[in-house]
Amino acid sequence: MKNISLLMLAGVLLTQVSCKKDDDAAAPDVQAQVVQTYADVVFATYEDSWITAKNLKATAAAFVADPSQAGLEATRAAYLAARTPYIQSEAFRFYAGPIDDDRGLEGLLNSWPLDESYIDYVQGNAGAGIINDATTFPSINTTVIAANNQPEGAGEESVSCGYHAVEFLLWGQDFSVDGPGNRPYTDYIVGTGGTATNQARRAQYLLACIDLLIENLNTLKEEWKAGGGQNYRATFVSTPNASISNFLTGVFRYTDGELSVERMYVALHSEDGDANRQENEQSCFSDQTNNDIILGQKGIRNVYLGKYVRIDGSVVEGKGLTDLVSVADATTNTAVLAAIYDADIKVNAIHAPFDNEIVSTNPAGNIRVQNAIDALHAEAAQYQTAGGKLGMIIN
């Protein structure tokens, strides 16, 4: 019996050693698969953003050709559809990838906050903005608009283009905590009296802004395209370990800093009154900040799980960080997943509109937003732990 037991123990040990060797041998392959999946998810997300931006352009072009309230509402809906994939892409930031490199594409796509009076008329100043300054800006086109986005010497809020510029041109300023801005469709009818003038220039500006979105999203799409030659993806997939460290660091920074702090904490804890809190929310013109937060968290989850649901309903998926971390430490993977789903619950618990949640007279709303902030910080901490289990320093 003793000999049989020893033989059985030896067999178990040999099996464990054999499995350990297999795991070690498989680790580089799993890393390669995780990186390939991530690149597939990034490409699909940017391609969907590009497709929906083109749909937005077609809808906006039809609207400005024959302005009506129905046309304005259709264009607003197309804008919100275009934001849905793009906000999920923000989890791809903060590691010097194509969105954050020296070309400044992120600044051309999603700069915020913006000074409305830099673009168009505002309450109390009917002649404000590039649109109403035909002397300085005789032509309105993509080149002019891009060149004047946060120009040197101007403030960071001197934003001329990107999603939020389009948002402002569709909704106008928001003066209510109960609803979005209410720009009239007549702002685009040439010859209409009232506050707005330069209707034709406003239409040109709107369409040029959307063209810039399409152009820059196409650049990002091509950088992540499989078989795209010597693009960013080709280098990215050739160094799996470094790439995983980079995009895990990016997810941590987005979760712990940009989403939870810049997008939420700053607005919630502004000490300059409720009006300033409202100005500090991201999608203040359309009152879609709560969806930005939900979709931001969804993008983070997409990265960790290695899964993205496309706008046509198809699913891009494969090996994700969850598969890699579960091999390194199953307990840590379980903790990360629990933190992700807790953050999902907390961000979805925020009531719309976000600006009504953060006013000082809504303590219950303040608590909901703070709970979501805390959950995002807890989620970020788990990404640091997961990185440590993978032998990576995430900071």
Image (spheres, rainbow, N blue to C red):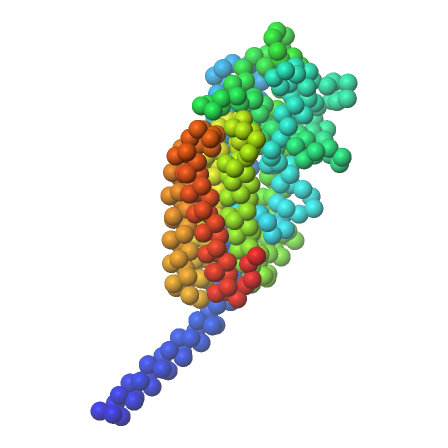
The answer to which of 246 and 52 lies nearer the viewer is: 246
- Seen in the picture, residue 143 relative to 20 is either above or below; the reply is above
The one nearer the camera, 77 or 33, is 77
Instruction: Pick whichever, 91 or 69, lies toward us.
Output: 91
Residue 68: give x, y in percent of width and height: 51, 14
Identify the residue at image location x=41%, y=52%.
339
Left or right: where 84 falls relative to 222: left
Q: Quadrant of the N terminus?
A: bottom left
Q: How many marks?
A: 0
Residue at x 43%, y 53% (from the top left corner): 305
Task: Say if residue 147 shows up in the picture.
Answer: no
Q: Is residue 83 left or right of residue 9?
A: right
Estimate the x, y position of residue 58 in percent, counting from the top left.
55, 26
Seen at 41% across and 38% down, the residue is: 367
Snapshot quadrant of residue 134: top right
Q: Is residue 101 above or below residue 115?
A: below
Q: Outermost residue, left direction?
A: 1
Q: Quadrant of the C terminus?
A: bottom right
Q: Is residue 201 left or right of residue 53?
A: right
> Does the image show residue 195?
yes
Which sits in the foreground, 193 or 368?
368
Give coordinates of residue 344: x percent, y percent: 40, 44
Whole-percent x and y of residue 334? Answer: 38, 58
